[in-house]
Image (cartoon, helix red, strand yellow):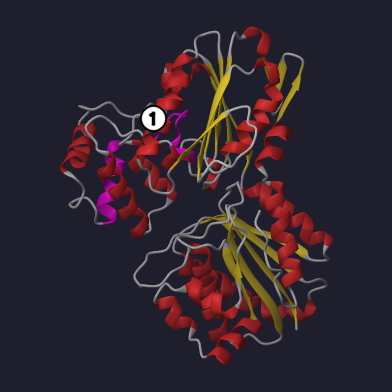
């Protein structure tokens, strides 16, 4: 993790210690080594045993933001039984000694490297036979890194549609439903390529509810969504008419049964597929809770499934904090409220920011409106992958001092919010959190600290 300037403020040191503990708990190497234990030829994954002696060859494919650490940790466990493997990761491959081959692919918008990566992964899966074992390590970002458009669908058309959906504020689930129905690898395509090999999926979840069909668009999992749903999503965001003729034709033919649906539950392809969630948002939240307790706070879980528009969610949380101000004086200990999930932002302004910094700015605006007195508070939101939209920050934080700083600098928080310019606002007030890419991804983390002033 990149160097980070310590937060400054009455609660800042506590907040930083709490989010750092949360990120440490979802370190991919530690998650794999803690979930996959080998004794001789027996590999135990979360209490499920797999006998390496019963398999002739063992392959590993790993893709996503945590791909390198997940894949290499597993390779170290498999050791001499590893036959071959491939890691597909975003960004340049750092120099080092690896047991697995590493290649780079594009994220968050796929390109030709993503197509080549998908082909390479499918080739390895196809090599695995009935007496072979294929481990599939999946983490957030896998949908873009592994992209193989369905026959007749050009990459440029799929990429443009992905970008349009992201700008419109589509959720990750909605994005993945559309992508799965334009793909030859998502929605169970990888499991189909590997059949009849035994497949063991190890996933770090970056989606609400830890749905294996949504993480990286479920390449080794059955898909419950349909072509009709995919079309409805495009219509909901006003993108159906502007979608390419080939995309519209595929969805229409799929809805009529003329194009094969994604693989569904009960398909024979999944008879030898086993899937395990090795970490997720709750993993991070539990670690945050433990650290908060050590630092003298009363920790309370609010949610691990935040969703919807960032500024609306922020308004709800700010109103809740304002209500708590009335009883803050009677609290035996300061409170640490914890939440997670993944919000969206509908971009209408010309500014720069991400869902986390927009959430904090919207909350700051609401707290300033409420004029909360008698309460010392801090609000923080960050992306556990270290990336908040198209910025170099992971997120932002704010407290009552931030309101005063903004006034002193002549900044109008509401105006910056209207222009979706949260990043520049917090850059001026000194409230950005910059970690650099963390190598993991379990959605976002929100921390609210408060006590009587």
Q: Is residue 59 visible?
A: no
Location of mark 1 (residue): 185
Displayed quadrant of residue 204: top right
Other-residue count near label 1 (Cα within 10 Å), few / some / many at <14 / 14–19 / ≥20: many
Q: Is residue 271 visible?
A: yes
Compared with residue 3, is residue 246 higher up or lower down, i.e. above or below? above
Please indicate whether residue 400 sits to the left or right of residue 423 in the image.
right
Q: Residue at x 61, y 74 (%)?
A: 431
398 falls in the magenta region: no
What x and y, as percent, mark residue 447? 65, 64
Q: What is the span of residues highlighted in magenta in the rendered image?
A: 214-237
Please indicate whether residue 158 sits to the left or right of residue 432 in the image.
left
What x and y, as percent, mark residue 50? 66, 17
Which sits in the foreground, 339 or 347? 347
Secondary structure beneath label 1: loop
Q: Residue at x 55, y 52 (%)?
A: 443
Q: Residue at x 56, y 75 (%)?
A: 319
Compared with residue 276, is residue 417 higher up or lower down, i.e. above or below? below
What x and y, as percent, mark residue 112? 35, 38
Residue furthest front as drawn: 95
Displayed quadrant of residue 181: top left
Compared with residue 74, is residue 374 higher up or lower down, i.e. above or below? below
Displayed quadrant of residue 210: top right
What x and y, as percent, mark residue 89? 51, 40
233 falls in the magenta region: yes
């Amino acid at each position: 993790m990149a160097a980070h300037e310590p937060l400054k403020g009455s609660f800042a040191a506590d907040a930083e210690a709490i989010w750092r503990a949360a990120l440490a708990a979802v370190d991919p190497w530690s998650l794999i080594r803690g979930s996959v234990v080998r004794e001789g030829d027996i590999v135990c994954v979360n209490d499920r045993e797999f006998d390496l002696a019963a398999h002739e060859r063992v392959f590993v494919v790993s893709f996503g933001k945590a791909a390198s650490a997940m894949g290499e940790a597993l390779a170290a466990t498999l050791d001499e039984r590893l036959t071959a493997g491939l890691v597909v990761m975003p960004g340049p491959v750092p120099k080092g000694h690896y047991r697995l081959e590493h290649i780079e692919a594009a994220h968050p918008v796929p390109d030709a490297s993503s197509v080549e990566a998908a082909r390479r992964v499918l080739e390895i899966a196809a090599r695995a036979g009935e007496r072979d074992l294929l481990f599939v390590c999946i983490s957030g970002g896998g949908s873009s890194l592994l992209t193989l458009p369905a026959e007749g669908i050009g990459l440029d058309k799929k990429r443009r549609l992905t970008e349009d959906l992201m700008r419109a504020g589509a959720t990750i689930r909605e994005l993945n439903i559309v992508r799965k129905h334009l793909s030859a690898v998502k929605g169970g395509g990888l499991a189909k390529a590997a059949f009849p090999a035994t497949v063991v999926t190890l996933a770090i979840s970056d989606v609400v509810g830890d749905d294996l069909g949504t993480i990286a668009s479920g390449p080794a999992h059955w898909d419950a969504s349909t072509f009709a749903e995919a079309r409805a999503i495009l219509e909901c965001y006003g993108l159906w008419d502007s979608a390419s003729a080939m995309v519209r034709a595929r969805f229409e033919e799929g809805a009529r049964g003329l194009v094969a649906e994604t693989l569904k539950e009960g398909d024979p392809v999944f008879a030898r597929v086993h899937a395990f969630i090795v970490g997720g948002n709750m993993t991070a939240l539990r670690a945050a809770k433990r650290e908060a307790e050590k630092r003298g706070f009363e920790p309370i879980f609010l949610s691990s499934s935040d969703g919807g528009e960032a500024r609306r969610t922020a308004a709800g949380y700010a109103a809740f904090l304002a209500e708590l101000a009335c009883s803050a004086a009677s609290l035996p200990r300061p409170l640490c409220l914890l939440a997670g999930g993944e919000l969206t932002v509908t971009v209408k302004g010309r500014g720069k920011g991400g869902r986390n910094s927009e959430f904090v700015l919207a909350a700051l605006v609401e707290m300033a409106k409420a004029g909360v007195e008698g309460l010392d508070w801090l609000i923080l939101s960050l992306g556990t992958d270290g990336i908040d939209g198209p910025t170099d920050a992971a997120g932002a934080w704010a407290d009552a001092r931030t309101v005063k700083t903004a006034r002193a600098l002549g900044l109008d928080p509401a105006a910056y919010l209207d222009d979706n310019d949260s990043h520049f606002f917090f850059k001026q007030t000194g409230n950005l959190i910059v970690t650099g890419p963390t190598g993991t991804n379990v959605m976002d983390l929100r921390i609210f600290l408060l006590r009587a002033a």
